[in-house]
Image: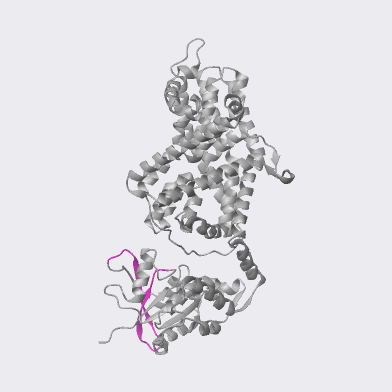
Amino acid sequence: MSRKRSAALVGNPNAGKSALFNALTGARQKIANYPGVTVERKAGRLILPSGEPVELTDLPGSYGLHATSPDEEVTRRVILGELAGEAAPDVLVIVLDASNLEQHLVFAQEVIALGKPTVVALNMVDLAERDGLVLDPQVLAQALGVPVIPTVAVRRRGLTELAAAIAEAESHASDTPHPRAHLDMVERRVEAQAIASAAIISESAKHRLHSRVDRVLLHPFIGPVFLFALLFVVFQAVFSWAAPFADGLEGAVGILTEMVKGHMAPGLLRDFVTDGALAGVGSVVVFLPQIIILFFFILALEASGYMARAAFLMDRLMAGVGLSGRSFIPLLSSFACAVPGIMATRSITDPRDRLTTILIAPLMTCSARLPVYAVIIAAFIPNRPVGPGGMIGMQGLVLFGLYVIGIVGAMLAALALRGTVTKGAASGFIMELPKYQMPRLRDLGLGLFQRAWIFLRRAGTIIFYVTVVLWLLLNFPRAGQGESQVDASIAGRIANGIAVVVEPIGFNRDIALALIPSMAAREVAVSSLATTYAVDSSDEDETAHQLSDQLAKRWSLPTALAFLAWFVFAPQCISTIAVTRRETNGWKWPGFMLAYLFGLAYVFAGITYWGAIALGL
């Protein structure tokens, strides 16, 4: 009995292979794992026009035959006939996304160069035409040297023609070496661009505009300049746009505090509500406008399609420190919170790349640090315009600088780690670039609501509980006549012990008191300071002053700068440590992370403090 003929669908991820596989095989499918691996195998029966059955396999998406993941390794071994118990497919069907032809042609050339019987399915031509791009399959077939069949899998268009081409593919195969067999990756990219351009019959002004925009935004020199200029504008907006709303929230907290004082008799219960709950939680809630503005820009850039291009731009920079552009998205996610950022490293296939990305993720300035930065900047940095024409705000400039310091610190840490504990060369990456589109206001609104709710929920739970505990520790035992309540309290005595360790880097007892609860959540540092100064104040008018005024009166500028330096480098919350432990399956790497980040924080806070004193600040 002769062996049943076989064919395999290959191509980049998101080319529509699964939809085409389902359309060609219908219900005649089976799913299992490949021998010895956990990669899923989808196989089905394709009926040719002659009635002959062909075993059709849907191979995992791949960007090249130089495998960088288990999925790509399976695809490579199946195509080359190297998988145990699996014969090489008789026919390869390359599935191309017509709307992203240039990118998909890179891998297609590599597969065609193998010289095996091959057919190209030019899929999703309807979506390309909807976007204003019309292609000539015959020109494409002539350039590639194999049959090209236009298909729309979801509408079952072109399936009969594709099945007929599969039936005849072996008879058209040539034994002569393919002319593109010896091209390298760069040459294939150049060739892909030329082939894609030649195959275009017509394109709309919209499609041409997108291509021209990409030529600017992805330019090796203009692109990074635009990216950093955009980030600069974002951080200027975080301060300038949020100011009126933050002032309004601060005023509302002040009014609420006065109302409580007017309706409650003096005593510990009133002090708990005003100095504990309202002073602590309220000092964090006032930064909600800055959080919302920051996330507005992040969500808008993601929805527009620009964020993926930023990852592409960052690949060159990250390769210089031993990472690839794959690490950019997890690190970018860490600007919101390191926990999802660390979880997002699962998409990084190289284990050393992944571990390095996990270890530097806490250096990205998460949104929880924003209230800390904002209150110190408001207290010590004058709100005045600088630069040509006064277009740049001093406070926004300092905030941008803190984010840049965190990024530079992360890159240098990655370079050091890749040269020592995670030693290895950088791995390259290829990614799909989504189409440009206008962000939907509904999606932006929903995303902002979710982020705001998460922030307020933290303020109402973690920050509230920690503030309550701190207030209790600050108020008991009660101080004697003429004695400071903070000095007499349990918290004050604990802080005095910690202050001995942090005094050399310019930190006072109040900062020492704020450092420990801030490990629960970064924002707690602000509420801890607000609660401490509210308890420590004997003057009703002084208690009513906002935290930034209290800090400006009690701290020196070198101490404030050292405090900012500490929070640039210090580890993030306990949740970050917990997720690191889960993602690395042990306490070795979380322990290493804590040690090296606390070490960096201590050293750079000390350098900042003594450097500021030496400069006479």
How many numbered dots are placed on residues in this image?
0
Residue 616 % position (x, y): 60, 30
Residue 423 % position (x, y): 38, 53
Q: Residue furthest top?
A: 481
- In this rendering, would 378 be left or right of 27? right
Q: Residue at x 50, y 16 (%)?
A: 484
Viewer-side residue, 511 vs 452:
511
Viewer-side residue, 129 vs 588:
588
Residue 297 % position (x, y): 59, 50
Q: Is residue 286 visible?
A: no
Q: Residue furthest left?
A: 1
| Residue 42 magenta-highlighted | yes
Relative height, residue 25 to residue 34 (above, below): below
Quarter in which the N terminus is drawn: bottom left
Quarter in which the C terminus is drawn: top right
Q: Is residue 182 visible?
A: yes
> What is the image's colouring?
one colour
| Residue 551 magenta-highlighted | no
Residue 4 % position (x, y): 31, 83
Relative height, residue 194 to residue 510 (above, below): below
Magenta span of residues: 36-61
Q: Residue furthest right?
A: 389
- In this rendering, would 408 be left or right of 206? left
Q: Residue furthest front?
A: 614
